[in-house]
Image (cartoon, rainbow, N blue to C red):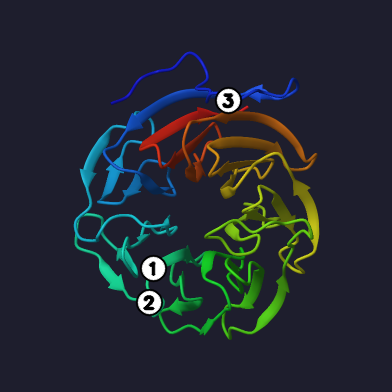
């Protein structure tokens, strides 16, 4: 089902700040199940949507469902395309599935810690980094591996493919930079406020998501307390703190690296001017949002989550 909206979908009790523009929702599609991940192909022509039950292909403009992908056990907490068009999707129960050809059955990668949360292709599309709920991480094929103290929540590569960034939750809740060839730790940063109160079922201030800006100059770290910390990828040094969100789950940069979109478990969507650190726009839905991606032309953000919708928002 798809419908055009003329007004912003606003959750009960939500109020916009006077100097923040409301985001306009351009289109939406309703699925039978909660949506755990979305991914766009490098050319922007194919949208992958992973739910608890299946992995489907959609038209990213009309949000029309095209077909279900063969194999797999649904879409878990991660989906990502390589530059060559290979698709990796985290399994619902364990491991990850890789489609070299979207018309054929996938290859399965198991993981010792069960469910995979972090998935990332190297820039050349030849290697896949995986991180799981047991803190195990590895690079396939034939790369380094290791185990961190907390479950690995996210993974992303540097533009030159020499560094692998990982984030963790639970008792660790930190960001790591590792040598992608040897696995050697280059730096580790943890930023848990002294006033942080751990919620039941969560660890410390968990780092749910990692996103590298397209120009490679900023690493966006999405924290459970709502902050997005922008770090220098080379040193881990804190560059800027973006505030205003709650329970932030994932972020996405626009192609020119000028804006950052973040979604959270409170159902909020926030858009920041990266250089100024100023919030430009926001919107609110009624249930948790878990994933966001930006179209290659930088005009729209696609969000998904517990409310079973994939929504298309026009960016400022």
Which label lies toward us, 1 or 3?
A: 1
* Residue receiving disc 1: 115
Q: Residues within 10 Å of mark 3 (few under 14, many from 20)?
A: many
- What residue is shown at x 52% (from left), y 69% (from top)? 152
- What residue is shown at x 57% (from left), y 28% (from top)? 283
Q: Is residue 215 above or below residue 171?
A: above
To which quarter of the image does residue 198 belong?
A: bottom right
- What residue is shown at x 50% (from left), y 30% (from top)? 285
* Residue receiving disc 3: 23
Residue 41 horizontal/vertical position (percent): 40, 48
Q: Which mark is residue 111?
A: 2
> Does the residue at mark 2 contact the one at mark 1 (Cβ under 8 Å)?
yes
Q: Nearer the viewer, residue 6 or 59?
A: 6
Question: Which residue ends up furthest to the top in the rendered image?
Answer: 6
Q: Is residue 110 above or below residue 77?
A: below
Element on which disc 2 rests: loop
Q: CA distance from mark 1 to mark 3?
A: 34 Å
Q: CA distance from mark 2 to mark 1?
A: 7 Å
The C terminus lies in quadrant: top right
């Amino acid at each position: 089902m798809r419908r055009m909206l003329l007004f912003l979908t606003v959750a009960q009790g939500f109020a916009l700040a006077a100097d923040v523009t409301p985001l306009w929702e351009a289109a939406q599609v309703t699925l039978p199940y909660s949506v755990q991940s979305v991914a766009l192909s490098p050319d922007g022509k194919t949208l992958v949507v992973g739910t608890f039950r299946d992995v489907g292909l959609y038209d990213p403009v009309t949000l029309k469902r095209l077909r279900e992908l063969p194999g797999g056990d649904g879409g878990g907490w991660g989906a990502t395309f390589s530059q060559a068009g290979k698709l990796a999707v985290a399994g619902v129960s364990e491991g990850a599935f890789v489609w070299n050809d979207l018309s054929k059955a996938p290859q399965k990668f198991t993981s010792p810690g069960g469910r995979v949360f972090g998935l990332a292709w190297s820039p050349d599309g030849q290697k896949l980094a995986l991180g799981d709920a047991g803190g195990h991480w590895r690079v396939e094929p034939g790369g380094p591996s290791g185990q961190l103290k907390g479950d690995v929540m996210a993974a992303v590569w540097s533009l030159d493919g020499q560094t692998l960034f990982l984030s963790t939750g639970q008792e660790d809740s930190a960001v790591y930079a590792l040598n992608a060839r040897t696995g050697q730790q280059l730096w580790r940063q943890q930023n848990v406020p002294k006033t942080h109160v751990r919620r039941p079922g969560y660890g410390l201030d968990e780092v749910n998501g990692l996103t590298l800006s397209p120009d490679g100059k900023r690493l966006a770290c999405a924290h459970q307390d709502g902050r997005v910390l922008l770090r220098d990828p080379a040193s881990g040094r804190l560059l800027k703190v973006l505030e205003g969100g709650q329970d932030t789950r994932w972020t996405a940069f626009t192609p020119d690296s000028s804006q950052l979109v973040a979604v959270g478990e409170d159902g909020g969507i926030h858009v920041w001017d990266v250089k100024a650190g100023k919030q430009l726009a926001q919107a609110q839905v009624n249930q948790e949002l878990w994933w966001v991606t930006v179209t290659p032309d930088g005009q729209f953000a696609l969000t998904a989550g517990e409310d079973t919708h994939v929504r298309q928002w026009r960016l400022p």
